Image (cartoon, grey):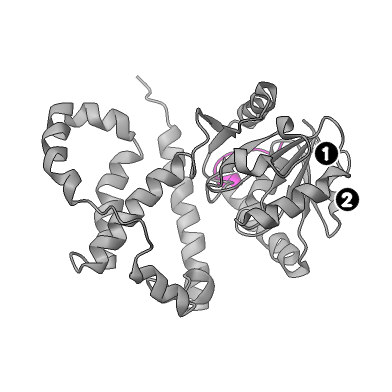
Amino acid sequence: MKRVAVIGLGTMGPGIAQRLARGGLVVTAFDTQDDQIEKAKAMLPLIAGALDRLGITPQPGGEVRFTASLADAVKDADLVIENVPEKIEIKAEVYRALDGLIGPNTLVVSDTSGIPISTLQEHISHPERFCGMHWSNPPHIIPMIEVISGAKTAPETAEAIVALIEELGLLPVVINKDVPGFVENRILYALLREAIDLVEEGVIAPEALDTCVSWGIGYKLSVIGPMALLDVAGLDIYHSVASFLNRELSARADIAPFITKRVDEKRLGLKTGGGVYAYTPERAKELIAERARKLVAVRRALEERDPS
């Protein structure tokens, strides 16, 4: 693959585009909104700085250019990455528009966070050339990418995406079954459901919960995955604790009032100046930069090889 189109420049698009370009690919980035294009352009130097700190050197030929024309974005593309909002109807509209614009060998992938790929495939003319390519935010720093085949995905399509990820020096994770949320977000949302429930029930304050998770299980899980952690702790210990604790864990199927109340009040997080916590515009920018620096440092530490 040499030419890639990134469709949608919200939270993930700029990082995906810049990381692909750093790997030597020619990337054309598209959005329907001019302000999103301008925001994405402004983000590229910050993203490039993070990639520099990771030691990811630019490969020859890579570049990112921007366009407000979908036809221009996908012209001669080997791969189209759809990164538009998480609504099936919006994604379906993009796929219908692509039908008359892409070549017979162009692959299309979705960066959906959890809509089943088999569902999205129903809206594209060549479902065999379509699969999921779920990046993790921030995509230019976190190296793991989930690859998900739908019911009609040709094996060679998923194989080509896995090969691309490996060529970029990233970590493909093949998901064997097309389940909603795939794997990363299923684990994340299970954790978030329990965390929200504990805060809402007054068991712990939000700040204390964040400390507990970040410096407790989060610290361990960055080095020892959940399945390996079972062996470290002992399956007998897990069996014993789970025998009574599983009954106590949150199993709610709706969305907690803690969240719905804030959404109704338009308190959506960093982007609105407040969610669980309150943020000034200056503090929001500081947090984004600070967290990026820390993620870079953690990744560099995790990639270190034991000299022995």
Q: Nearer the viewer, residue 42 or 256?
A: 256
Above or below 291: residue 261: below
Tell me the CA gap for discs 2 and 1. Answer: 10 Å
**Numbered mark located on residue 134 in the image:** none
What range of the chain is rendered magenta? 51-59
Query: How many C-alpha atoms fall within 10 Å of the one at disc 2: few (<14), some, or many (≥20)?
Result: some
Pointer 2 with pointer 1, Cβ within 8 A: no
At 70% across and 47% down in the image, what residue appears? Answer: 82
Q: Position of residue 280 (x, y in %)?
A: 47, 78
Q: Nearer the viewer, residue 85 or 48?
A: 85
How many numbered discs sit on the rendered protein?
2
**Residue at mark 2:** 71
Name which quarter of the figure residue 169 lies in: top right
Element class at badge 2: helix
Element class at badge 1: loop
Tell me which label, 2 or 1, sits earlier in the chain. 2
Position of residue 117 in the picture relative to residue 260 (left or right): right
Amino acid of disc 2: Ala
Above or below 265: residue 134: above
At 50% across and 31% down in the image, what residue appears? Answer: 177
Can residue 208 be seen here? The reply is no
Q: Position of residue 208 (x, y in %)?
A: 24, 63
**Numbered mark located on residue 77 in the image:** 1
Amino acid of disc 1: Ala
Q: Is residue 52 magenta?
A: yes
